[in-house]
Amino acid sequence: MRPEVKVTEDPAGAAAERLAAAEGHVVLTGGSTPRTAYERAAAHRPEWSGTEIWFTDERCVPPDHEHSNYRLVKEALLDRIQGAEVHRMRGELGPHEGAAAYEQALRESFDDDLPAMELMLLGLGPDVHICSLFPGDEALEEHERRVVGVDMAGMAPLVPRITLTLPVVNATRSLVFLVTGEEKAEAVSRAFSGPPDPRAPASLVDLVAGSLELICDPAAASWL
């Protein structure tokens, strides 16, 4: 699926504006570039009542661990805002028990229907992975579960993961990729210029009815 592409010298700022304007169910990811976007979104909008925050994936570590996506989002955004309802992936439970608990939380919030999130922010790995869906992993073939455990991560940190599945990603109403740096240029090309390929998980994004946007800097867009 081809995205609407926004090339800017300030991709974190553009993503922060999208986040600050979002309401309803919002899904966040980890990463250094999103951290800056979260800090700036909090500055734009300190009051987040009416927003429920979910997570794309989590490393199976305690919530205060340096590798925890929750810790990153907490420090950059949650500690700076008020009013949001936060649904944390409980990585400390392990990949499979943690995935089952998060799937149950989604079922309770969405009346057992496939979740249709208002906004999802995704990064893009240099191997073209999204969430914790790595190239060639069997989790890419999951069509029934909303959340699964991943025993072996495809890149560092090499710890088990919990991740949303492609059906949840593809049901999102507004999906935003935030990508920066020349080292991601090839991944961007493989994700958005080539055919769907399980070796490039981002290329499997095919929204049911939503909008797809790529926010990136000129370096990341250089292979498009």
Image (tube, rainbow, N blue to C red):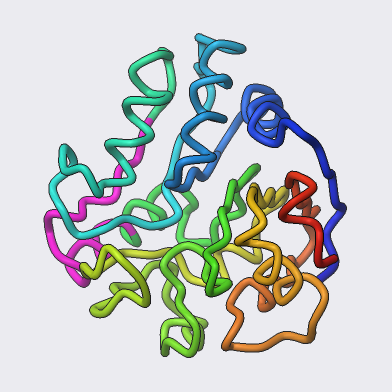
- Residue 186 position within the rendered picture, expressed as x and y whole percent measured from the top left: 69, 71
Figure quadrant of residue 88: top left
Magenta-colored stretch includes residue 91: yes
Q: Split into 4 quadrants, where in the image is the N terminus?
A: bottom right
Of 98 and 137, nearer the camera is 137
Magenta-colored stretch includes residue 202: no
| Residue at left offset 55%, top offset 11% | 43
| Residue at left offset 72%, top offset 85% | 196
Q: Main secondary structure of the magenta part?
A: helix
Of 101 and 92, nearer the camera is 92
- Residue 194 position within the rendered picture, expressed as x and y whole percent measured from the top left: 79, 82
Q: Split into 4 quadrants, where in the image is the C terminus?
A: bottom right
| Residue at left offset 63%, top offset 71% | 202
Of 107 and 83, nearer the camera is 83
Q: How many marks?
A: 0
Figure quadrant of residue 171: bottom right
- Residue 177 position within the rendered picture, expressed as x and y whole percent measured from the top left: 66, 52
Vertical arrangement, residue 136 with respect to residue 77, above or below: below
Vertical arrangement, residue 108 with respect to residue 80, above or below: below
In the image, taking residue 104 as reference, residue 22 lies left or right, namely right
Region rendered in magenta: 86-102
In the image, taking residue 178 as reference, residue 53 lies left or right, namely left
Of 63 and 115, nearer the camera is 63
| Residue at left offset 32%, top offset 55% | 58
- Residue 172 position within the rendered picture, expressed as x and y whole percent measured from the top left: 65, 55
In the image, taking residue 104 as reference, residue 33 lies left or right, namely right
